Each structure stands twice: as structure tokens, then as C-alpha cells.
Amino acid sequence: MSWLQRLKGGLTRTKDAIVNKVAMTVRRAVAVNDEFWEQIEEILILGDVGMNTAVAMVDEMRQRYRQNKPRDMEELLGMISQVMAGKLQPGDQRDPLAFEPGLNVIMLIGVNGSGKTTTTGKLANYFSAQGKKVMLAACDTFRAAAVEQLEIWANRADVPIVRHQAGTDPAAVMFDAVESARARNVDILLADTAGRLHTKHNLMEELKKLQRVAVEKGGAASFRSWLVLDATLGQNSLNQVKLFNESVPVDALVITKLDGTAKGGIVFAIQSEIKVPIAFIGVGEKLEDMMPFRAAEFSQALIGDVSSDNVTETSEEIAEEQQAQ
């Protein structure tokens, strides 16, 4: 199965929650008036696109409708789809996968349960498959079995790992990992870290210390903090980005668990409201179910060739129609 096919499958629930409902609303519309646009806006908001982004999208749809005057509902749906696809474009954001010559350190950060350790393993597999020399650093020395879990992922991805005993200072792990990575001419060092809340000052300071150790003492060519977000949290993920960014500069995002939620609309909000690029997205549990985020590819998988003829109703909508009859 190709990545695009896996991506389409992973985004099924989000497509049902947003794209298919928009298409059904267009198909059933008697007139394009304020009530119609309010229905579209409501669908976007309930799909976790977010209030600000939803309002901006509908405003643009209204403007294009007045300017282009679609001849029928099919043209209107195409226009709406174009606006939605446009909001997924990253604009002038820099490429998070443009690496420096030498050692590049990527520190995976985030709250507990976002999937940092699993993400670290999947990224190791991806970069290794791309011909990069990869190493892992087990800087989460506090969570029970975190080091052992990362070691399993290292074995699956067939990459080396630097680990210490549980309870060790994470900065010591980082220092040894950078030293080892430089000695082995490693391209990418992926550092797994303990989950933390932005409100925990000491833990946020620890992340800054890890960066200092990697760059100032270890001599890494570049250092990046990638925030791992759980897509099932919807709009709460947006708040996490803003709050983490206030404490530790977030260079890119990794969005996990898109296959297990109808809240994938958060990607629209991130692209529109936050100037932090999305590096990777995950749509499954397998090693190969995490790939770089490409706006055009994501748009094709989520929106694709939407027409009122090929959109199928969700089971919820079918039940509503049966009740109405």
C-alpha cells in the first residue's frame, strides 16, 4: 500500500467530519445565503478547524462566491474545496528537513502520552531508510521503562542508542550521545525526552540545558526542538504549541495519531495561525506509518476530487435522514 493510500485511510474520520459534511451541505442547499455559510462555518468549527481559522475560511469563500458567481452547486463545491486546500499550504515557512552538514540534533519534546518515544523510533527508521546515519539518545530517564522502550525501537530501526541508568541526569545522556555521534560521523541524533507540562519551570529549564549541552559543549552543527502533538486532543494541541513556544523555541511539529480521530482539522488551524512548520505526521502504528508532511499530498488525501456525486453519507447522516422520514 502506498503512503498516499495509507494517508487517505488514516484521514477517513476527519474527512467524514469536515469534507464530506461540507459536500453534503452544498448538495442539499436550496439557496446560498447567510444560513448556508453559517452551516459551513459550524461544520469547520466542530471539526476542530478552530474559530479564527473557520471564520477566515468562510469569509474567503463568501468573497470568492461573490466574485466568481458559480453556475451550479458543483462549481460552488469546487470553489469551497480550493479555499480549504489553500489553507493547508505552509506559506513561506522554512523546510524543517533541510539539515546542516555535520551532526544535527533533534530533540523530541511534548506532554506525557503524546507519543514521543514511538515517534523517535519511527523517525529513526525513516531517516535511516533515506541513507542518513542515525543515532538515538534516551534522555527520558524518569519514566518507568522509557529507556527499554526506546531500545526496542532502536533495534527495530537498526540504529545505535546511547542510554544511561534510570534516574541519570538527562544532560549527561545528551553529552555522551553527542560525543558518540560525532565520533561515528552520525548525521542525525534523535533525543527522546521526558513528558512535561509548560507550567513546570524546572522541567522547561531542563530542555534549555539539553540544548546548551548539545551545542556549546558537544559541538552539534545544528539543534532543533520538535514538539510532538497528539491529534486526538484537537484544539488543545494548538494551545500546547503556543505555550511550549514561549518557554522553548519550537522549530517544527510532529502530529501523531491522525488515524484515530475526527479532529484532524487541527492541521488547518496550525497552518493558518501558527508559524511553526509541520515536519511529520503519523497515521498508524507501523514503522512506515509516519512520513514527512507535504501540504499538497495531505490536501489530496483529505479533500481530493470532492464532488457531490461521489461523496458518501456517514452512518450518522443516514440515521438522521431515516428518522426524518
Image (spheres, rainbow, N blue to C red):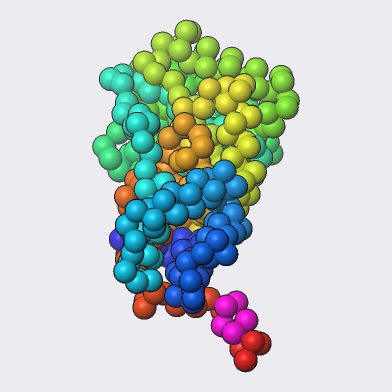
> Is 154 displayed left or right of 140 in the figure?
left
* Residue drawn at x 39%, y 56% as measured from the top left: 66
| The furthest residue to the top | 216
Q: Decide which of 232, 101 is in the foreground and name it.
A: 232
Q: Decide which of 15, 43 is in the foreground and name it.
A: 43
* Residue drawn at x 73%, y 27% as measured from the top left: 199
Is residue 92 in sight in this rendering?
A: yes
In the rendered image, the quadrant that contains the C terminus is: bottom right
Give the prevailing secondary structure in the magenta stretch: helix
* Residue drawn at x 57%, y 43% as measured from the top left: 52
Residue 177 in the image: state x and y as whole percent: 47, 22
In the rendered image, the quadrant that contains the N terminus is: bottom left
Q: Is residue 325 above or below residue 226?
A: below
* Residue drawn at x 46%, y 27% as measured from the top left: 251
Q: Decide which of 113, 304 is in the foreground and name it.
A: 304
The residue range painted magenta reads: 316-321
Residue 198 in the image: state x and y as whole percent: 68, 28
Residue 63 in the image: state x and y as whole percent: 41, 51
Q: Is residue 251 above or below residue 172?
A: below
Magenta residue check for 309: no
Magenta residue check for 320: yes
Q: Is residue 46 above or below residue 197?
A: below
| The furthest residue to the bottom | 325
